[in-house]
Image (cartoon, grey):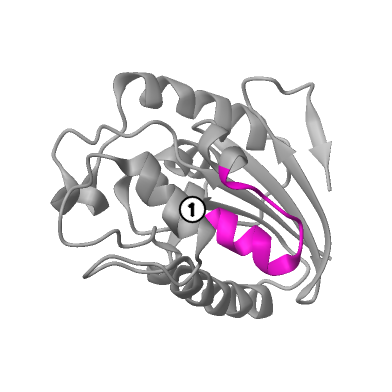
């Protein structure tokens, strides 16, 4: 069995606008909330830490990796979806459109189908290389949701919107076959939802 703790990043500072998406730093609150991730992962016997190349995801798992003496392996295809060429003021409507039609995208952006395909190809490679290991992967809300949907457990648009930052999804796989999923709110650690 392979166990993966997918860690959605802590709260990012998006004030630099759309063109800085890959380099959004964590807010002051986000930086403090990283401690929740480190505390949660410390006793999970993590063998390796991987991450999206985006700064907010990398920085969310970096403190844990450092404390565990692990180097973070950056996986380019674990990045968040490309939204498009321009900043979107009404992000709620854009998100609803994407969740209603997984092929919907804006010029220069990616559809949820494309994000899912890219992330699953990368994940299948990781599952081959780290078979039977326990991993922590720094990721994003949308990218993670598409991976969860690939394996069958349903996640709705409203659940995606309500997903806190940071947030953890513990997925267990037998080879590439889905076994189980636990959705873990680090702010409410006693409330674990098994799927």
> At 78% across and 25% down in the image, what residue appears?
191
Q: Quadrant of residue 93?
A: top left
Foreground: 192 or 104? 104
Instruction: Please determine whether, in this image, residue 158 is positioned above or below residue 151.
Output: above
What secondary structure is found at the residue carrying circle 1? helix
Mark count: 1
176 on left or right of 91: right
On whether residue 145 falls in the magenta region, the answer is yes
Q: Residue at x 56, y 35 (%)?
A: 163
Q: Position of residue 153 (x, y in %)?
A: 76, 57
Say whether residue 154 is visible. Answer: yes
Magenta span of residues: 144-157
**Residue 160 in the image: above or below residue 115:** above
> Where is residue 177 shown, x and y percent of the image?
81, 74
- Depth order, front residue of 80/135: 80
Q: Position of residue 47 (x, y in %)?
A: 66, 56
Q: Is residue 121 magenta?
A: no
Is 183 located above or below residue 125 in the figure?
A: above
- Residue at 42% x, 20% y is 32
Q: Which residue is depicted at the point 80% across and 36% down?
A: 193
User: Magenta-highlighted stretch: main secondary structure?
Assistant: helix
Q: Which residue is mark 1?
A: 142
Screen quadrant of the N terminus = bottom right
Residue toward you, 111 or 65: 111
Residue 118 spot, x, y in % from top left: 47, 75
Lateral position of residue 68 relative to residue 152, left or right: left
Please determine whether, in this image, residue 170 is positioned above or below residue 31: below
Q: Is residue 25 left or right of residue 175?
A: left
Residue 139 visible in the current orientation: no
Structural crowding at the residue carrying mark 1, measured as other residues with C-alpha within 10 Å and reported as few (<14), some (14–19) or many (≥20): many
Residue 107 occupies quadrant: bottom left
């Amino acid at each position: 069995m392979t166990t993966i703790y997918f860690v959605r990043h802590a709260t990012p500072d998006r004030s630099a606008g759309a063109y800085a998406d890959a380099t959004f730093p964590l807010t002051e609150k986000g930086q403090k909330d990283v401690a929740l991730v480190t505390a949660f992962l410390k006793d999970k016997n993590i063998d390796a830490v991987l991450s999206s190349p985006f700064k907010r995801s990398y920085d969310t798992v970096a403190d844990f990796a450092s404390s565990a003496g692990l180097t973070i392996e950056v996986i380019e295809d674990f990045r968040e979806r490309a939204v498009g060429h321009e900043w979107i003021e009404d992000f709620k409507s854009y998100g609803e459109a994407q969740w209603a039609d997984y092929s919907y995208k804006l010029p220069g952006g990616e559809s949820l189908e494309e994000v899912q395909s890219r992330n699953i190809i990368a994940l299948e490679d990781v599952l081959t290389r780290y078979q039977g290991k326990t991993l922590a992967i720094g990721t994003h809300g949308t990218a993670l949701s598409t991976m969860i949907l690939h394996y069958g457990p349903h996640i709705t648009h409203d659940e995606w919107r309500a997903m806190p930052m940071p947030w953890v999804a513990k997925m267990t796989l037998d080879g590439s076959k889905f076994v189980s999923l636990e959705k873990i709110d680090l702010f409410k650690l006693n409330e674990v939802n098994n799927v």
